[in-house]
Amino acid sequence: MNLNAVIDASPLIYFAKLDQLALLSRVVGPIGITPAVINETIHAGRGRHKSDARRIQQAVTDGQLITIALTASEESITRQLYEHSPLGRGECEVIACAHQRQLKAILHDKKARNIAVQHTIQTISPANVLFYALLRRQISFPMFKELLDGLAILTGMSAATLLEQQAIAEEIARRLEE
């Protein structure tokens, strides 16, 4: 199956906690999940009895998330990134796979996003997934606000950023209705 993106653990957990993995898949298309991200989200999550781990496992079972194995070159890039950057193993795998397979990377961490951009990888933040959903009329503005509020709580988004993003989304929604 062709993939459009590969996702790191944090955004995956956010969408699982919001119970919006299906929306994530509809907005982005086929999404790959690497071994380290599986370990961080499903295996570690199940060990702590997290409901988001069950949701992520179900998304894999349902085909909304596709498990991917790293190639030898992706493993090599992952090791280099892991040794020479402040990133975790999952972020390194995501960047390596996105780079080698020419995929988008769904990342939340600012350092990871900056390193991905240095490798000419297009990134998507969790909040921007919601903007894409709004623009494509996959969610309503009230739903956008509800999901953005939930995401703000999960990510520690500042009130100023939340209000700015809500204002932009409100204008987008208004223009879509014209």
Image: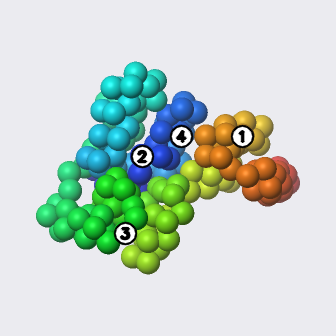
Q: In terms of sequence position, does the residue under pointer 4 or pointer 3 come before the other? A: 4
Dots 2, 1 in contact, CB < 8 A: no
**Residue at numbered disc 4:** 14
Q: In x, y percent, where is residue 163?
A: 81, 52
User: Are there few (<14), some (14-19), or many (20+) residues within 10 Å of tag 4?
Assistant: many
Identity of the amino acid at label 1?
Asp
Q: Which mark is residue 85?
A: 3
Label 2 – label 1 distance at C-alpha: 20 Å
Identity of the amino acid at label 3?
Ser
Q: Which mark is residue 9?
A: 2
Tag 2's secondary structure? helix
- 115 above or below 133? below
Instruction: Left or right? Give the position of 29 relative to 169.
Output: left
Residue drawn where x is 68% and y is 50% of the image: 157
Identity of the amino acid at label 4?
Tyr
Q: In which image quadrant can residue 54 be found?
A: top left
User: Are there few (<14), some (14-19), or many (20+) residues within 10 Å of tag 2?
Assistant: many
Residue drawn where x is 44% and y is 78% of the image: 118
Dots 2, 3 in contact, CB < 8 A: no
Identity of the amino acid at label 2?
Ala
Label 3 – label 1 distance at C-alpha: 31 Å
Dots 4, 2 in contact, CB < 8 A: no
Label 4 – label 2 distance at C-alpha: 9 Å
Q: In terms of sequence position, does the residue under pointer 2 or pointer 3 come before the other? A: 2
Q: In terms of sequence position, does the residue under pointer 4 or pointer 1 come before the other? A: 4
**Residue at numbered disc 1:** 149
Q: Which is closer to the viewer, label 2 or label 3?
A: 3
